[in-house]
Amino acid sequence: MQITKAIKKDKEEAMKVAANLKEWFNEQGLKNMRVDFELNNLIVAKENGKLSGFLCYTSYSGKILLMWMGVKKEFQRKGVGQKLLAWLEAEGKRFGFHSIEVETLPDEEAYEPYKITRSFYYKNGFERIFYKKARVKGWDDQIVLEKKL
């Protein structure tokens, strides 16, 4: 498996992957993602030249903000997400960042796909640091998870 910075074609492929992950990404999320892919950093995982996953990130004030991550359904639970995260950790250490942060639905939310998401982050060393109330009508509350580097 190769992890590389995305080129234009990869961005479109990543959007297709995200659009097929309806349990995680709704219309508004996909709209936001398209913009974030253009304005921020995007890496992709490829298996035999075919995109299997993506991770979008930016940085702010000594930390990396993991914005979006998705893995094609047929590649889930096969280490793709862990490899994307390992790449991001190495990049963070290379630049001297102190942590990686990600927002997701709270533990109090029983929705099964996000139970899986939270479990992934917890198993990979993230800890809940605070609860964030939604500031936009129609959006969900979030928790912020952090992994120290």
Image: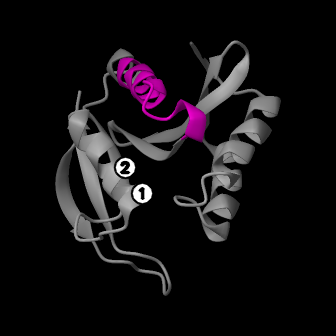
Query: Which of the 4 image quadrants contains residue 142?
Result: bottom left
Query: Which of the 4 image quadrants contains residue 129?
Result: bottom left
Say whether residue 43 is left or right of residue 59: right
The spot of residue 83 in percent (x, y) is: 44, 21
Asked whether disc 2 touches disc 1, contact meaning CB atoms under 8 Å apart, the reply is: yes
Q: Can the viewer see residue 143 in this picture?
A: yes
Residue ID at (27%, 46%): 119
Q: In front here: 139 or 80?
A: 80
Q: Residue furthest front?
A: 74
Amino acid type, residue under disc 2 in the picture: Thr
Nearer the viewer's eye, disc 2 or disc 1? 1
Within 10 angstroms of label 2, few (less than 14), some, or many (20 or more) residues? some
Residue 117, numbered circle: 2
Within 10 angstroms of label 1, few (less than 14), some, or many (20 or more) residues? few
State the separation of the CA atoms marked 2 and 1.
Answer: 6 Å
Question: Residue beneath label 1, please?
Answer: 113
Q: Can the viewer see residue 104 in this picture?
A: no
Which element carries disc 1, helix, strand or loop?
helix
Would you say residue 88 sits in the magenta stretch? yes
What span is in magenta? 71-90
The overriding secondary structure of the stretch rendered in magenta is: helix
